[in-house]
Image: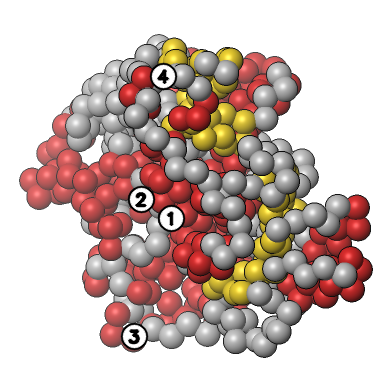
Amino acid sequence: MVININSKPINNNSTDTTITASSPNARILIVEPDTSLLTVLSLVIRKHYDVDVVAKGSKSAVIEYLKKDHNFKCIIVDDETSRGAASKIAIFSQNTFDISVPVISLVNQFSASIDNKFVYAKAIKPDVINPLIQALDSFLPKRKKISMSNSSSTDNSNSNSTSNSLSQYFFIQLEEILCFNYLDIDCYIKISEEKVLKILKKGDIFSVADYDKYKARGISGLYILYSDLNELIDKLFLNFKTLYDLNFYTSAENLANLSFNKNEMFSEEKTATVISSIVQALQNAEDQKLSYDDGMNISKQTIETIYETTAKFGVNSLTQHLTKAAVILSLSFIRSSPFLNNLFESSKKTVFENNDNYLVDHSVLLANIACLVASMRGWSSNLTYYKLVLAAFLHDMPLKNPKLARFRTTGDLMNRCHEFKDSELKEYMNHPQDAAKMIENYRMIPPDIGLIILEHHEKADGSGFPRGLNYSSISSLGQLFIVAHDIVSFIFSRSFKDIDAEVDGVTSEEDNNELNSQSVNLISFLNQHRMLYQHGEFKSIFDVLWNHFKFTKVASKFAR
């Protein structure tokens, strides 16, 4: 595979972990490089069984570990990225220690038919939970059912919560939270055997800075209510499956072998060219030969084809495949993008040389900036990047007139409403809801992408639309996406100010020189938005950006 979107080391540390349960003698060893699946497996196993979970990221690491410690009830091995690993580990245990440890192999649909007489059971990805539980039930000690009679003693509306004991709570390792950036449920920190303190409320995002802070204090994990555990597992398992589905598009060979209905193509020739370009770009990415500019240009061509096809046929299999391929392509170069202060200069030629395709240009740049801001904020999980890139690509999809995409507020639009038809004005006012509804037709995408899209014209002070939400009601990722969108709008409005003026025939040579000397400067942007971004996650994002540019003393500039 070109990019393993699921596998990402936590904060550059080893993925090896041990999660302790109440019984130190019963342990499970999991060999799984995919941190998102590892998190789900750990939660499911510890929910059902009274065991400890030890995690290793590779077969070689496991062999070395088993030489020192082989006392496990079961070994669960990823056999997708390392074919035959399960058999080799089973044989090693049998020959070296003269013991037979049940080994369960996690396979994909293509390797499931491979004969493996040394494996106790197989579970086919992505739906591994039920077959795994069926296999483990026969030899693992079941966890005693937790009575929820005392769970009401936890007041979710108050940050201080007491309980008779920690038996009402379930331990979650910090690495497991950081893997998805947030759990979307309340999380607590242990104060004593009798008391916990709520430190994350539902919807909060857990950053790298949070991870480092708690690790430095010797805290290895947080707690959630047992009554929230099933909901958490369902959400995280859905997130894993969306990432696993996305992995299909990391293979240039998979994309090259896709077939589509010619009657659902806006342009058969253009579609074939775009797919060929993506395949070549992914191959170049695998060889580390994909330049930032090439990646941006191919992404733009792909998004343009998606918009054209959707406008004519709606959401179909072609648009879904192209969208996810475009996400993978973007993620292949976004992680290596320059910091914000260098991004604009490197994107100048790619993005700003053409003023006629704003709808596509600003969507592609928005994906980059949103991910870079998220990285600076410490929200750098693959799932977070996936959500931001997909939202950026699809947020303005219902707009048939690309000029409408330039307006950030209804006030700006009303000042020029005479330039548009009534139907276009209605289209603009409804496009957040329409885009959010349109993506419901996409299969296997994170469910909260629709919320990010729905919120992208809201404002911190409540003056936005369509719902007039303020900072206290906008989701955390929604707030970050809004800031990134504001930055992109600022860049384009300043970059093309002189161009638009020349086109209108109202700019003198002296005026043009003055306009050319004005730079697109992020410090200027932050100063303009300082009062607006004073609350909620808006303020945290503002502070991160301000501190970055304050200490680096670098401002990105553009001149036409």
Residue tagged by mark 3?
261
Between circles 2 and 4, the one closer to the viewer is 2
- How far is disc 1 from disc 4 in space, using C-alphas? 28 Å
Q: Is residue 311 visible?
A: yes
Q: Quadrant of residue 67?
A: bottom right
Q: Are marks 1 and 2 in contact (CB under 8 Å)?
A: yes
Q: Nearer the viewer, residue 376 or 43?
A: 43
The quarter in which the N terminus is drawn is: bottom right
Residue tagged by mark 1?
238
* Tag of residue 536: 4
Residue tagged by mark 2?
447
Q: Are marks 1 and 3 in contact (CB under 8 Å)?
A: no
Residue at 25% over, 68% down: 314
User: What count of labels does the image hold?
Assistant: 4
Q: Of marks 3 and 4, which one's residue comes earlier in the chain? A: 3
Helix, strand or loop at label 2? It is loop
- How far is disc 2 from disc 3 in space, using C-alphas? 28 Å
Left or right: 112 in relation to 468: right
Categorize mark 3 by other alpha carbons within 10 Å: few (<14), some (14-19), many (20+): few
- Considering only vertical position in the picture, is 381 above or below 194? below
Between circles 1 and 2, the one closer to the viewer is 1
Q: Are marks 2 and 3 in contact (CB under 8 Å)?
A: no
- How far is disc 2 from disc 4 in space, using C-alphas? 23 Å
Going by the numbered disc 2, the residue's amino acid type is Pro
Horizontal and vertical percent position of residue 193 = 57, 18
Q: Are marks 1 and 4 in contact (CB under 8 Å)?
A: no
Residue at 37% over, 25% down: 150
Horizontal and vertical percent position of residue 549 = 63, 21
